[in-house]
Image (cartoon, rainbow, N blue to C red):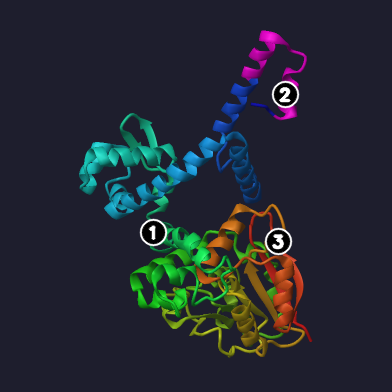
Amino acid sequence: MSLPANVLNGVNGVSGGTRNRGFQGILQGLMKSLENIDSDSFEDEGERAQAVVAAYALIARLETPWEFLARIGMGQPALGASLKVGKDLGLYGKWHEAGGEEKTSQELASLVGCDTILLDRILRHLAANHMVDEPSIGRFRPNKFTTSFLQPSFGEWINHLYDATIPCFFRMPEYLAQTGYKNPADPKDGVFQYTKGCKGEDCFHYFEKNPREGTSFDHVMSGVMANQAGWLDIYPHETVVSQAKDDSSPLVVDVGGSIGHDLERFRAAHPETASRLFLMDRPEVVARSRLPDPVNKIGYDFFTPQQATGARIYYMHGVLHDWPDKEARKILEMQRDALTPGYSKVLIHDHIAPKALAHPHTTAYDLTMMVMVAGEERSEDSWNALLNSAGYKLVKIWRSPEAVQGIIEAELAS
């Protein structure tokens, strides 16, 4: 094992047994320092996010090939299955309702109606992966991950993992082999359709017809929107209000805005604008929104012409990455006639994939979009080409050290 030069400098000039003792002392100090670092150790979210990526890279440097294969081939599949069994047993909710205190595996097995030996084996793997704490042998305590599963936006990820994500990735190699390893580009005939047996139907219509999976998917999407750096953290939202032309025309139109997490952030920051805010998504999705009146909540198919005309901002978060270029272009074209030249802006909140050394979230999103919807995470060049093809020009890309995603500001080309 080798340490960075700045660490090794502490033992330079020391030889033999003395050097070994010095090295071990530095190593022990380093290990102790690592044990004391947690999410509260950083000045801001940007530093914490950078440290997470550095930790991923550190694991890759430290692991042997065998340790890597054991982790992804046994540890991670077993972890997902253990989380799902816990979810199916109602473990996380029942534990919380019982006070959320430290309990033995026998007490927890009695609580959820499970064989003690079986639950103990599952809990030990959850503890080994820090999903629960194990303060002493056979005793377990909830932690931030366990309690997060009580929220549908987190807990439903476990169900969605088994409903869609794992099955699609499991069938992906088989599908690609049968299609001659062509990049999936048909949202109605891709990996998801091959897996679910629903050729000719995109995943969104599938979820409409399968309400249990659809409700789970909506919770997952809400979690995606609500638990990342928001657009107000990236884009100078004060200018949206200060540069508006009047006090009556539409201000922000959230296109495909789910139940309104992003729009609520703007409303909370600028409550006086509520009547000029528009949430637009499928009728059954908008119906679940808790945005207060007088925010406008309108059922809308973004493959049809936009009716809210002359807004300052047309905002799309995680919309265009759901679709191949043909469909994404159509969505942009359907908004185009509603824009006021020289005034209206389109804000696209999505990943802007770098050409190399992408964040692992970006590459994971990219492949997930591929298997679920034949979509993709586009590079800056690809975004620029897509916008130009739909009659727009890219004005600026806004970024923040706190966010993996960025915001593309665009306007009418002429």
Q: Nearer the viewer, mark 2 or mark 3?
A: 2
**Circles 2, 3 touching at the beta carbon (< 8 Å):** no
Pointer 2 residue? 8
What is the crowding at mark 3: few (fewer than 14 residues within 10 Å), some, or many (at least 20)? Answer: some
> In the drawing, does residue 116 fall left or right of residue 40?
left
Between the residue at mark 2 and the residue at mark 1, the CA separation in whole angstroms equals 46 Å
Between the residue at mark 2 and the residue at mark 3, the CA separation in whole angstroms equals 36 Å
Q: Position of residue 386 (x, y in %)?
A: 70, 76
Q: Position of residue 310 (x, y in %)?
A: 66, 88
Q: Residue furthest top?
A: 17
Which quadrant: the N terminus? Answer: top right
Q: Is residue 225 visible?
A: no
Of residues 120 and 344, the one drawn nearer to the viewer in this rendering: 120
Pointer 1 residue? 162
Q: Nearer the viewer, mark 1 or mark 3?
A: 1
Task: Provide the residue span drawn in magenta.
Answer: 4-25
Mark 2: secondary structure? helix
Between the residue at mark 1 and the residue at mark 3, the CA separation in whole angstroms equals 33 Å
Q: Position of residue 61 (x, y in %)?
A: 63, 37
Write down the quadrant of residue 119 in the picture.
Answer: top left
Q: Residue at x 66, y 18 (%)?
A: 23
What is the crowding at mark 2: few (fewer than 14 residues within 10 Å), some, or many (at least 20)? Answer: some
Q: Return the disc, 2 or 3, that comes first in the chain's sequence.
A: 2
Q: Nearer the viewer, mark 2 or mark 1?
A: 1
Pointer 3 residue? 399
Q: Residue at x 49, y 45 (%)?
A: 72
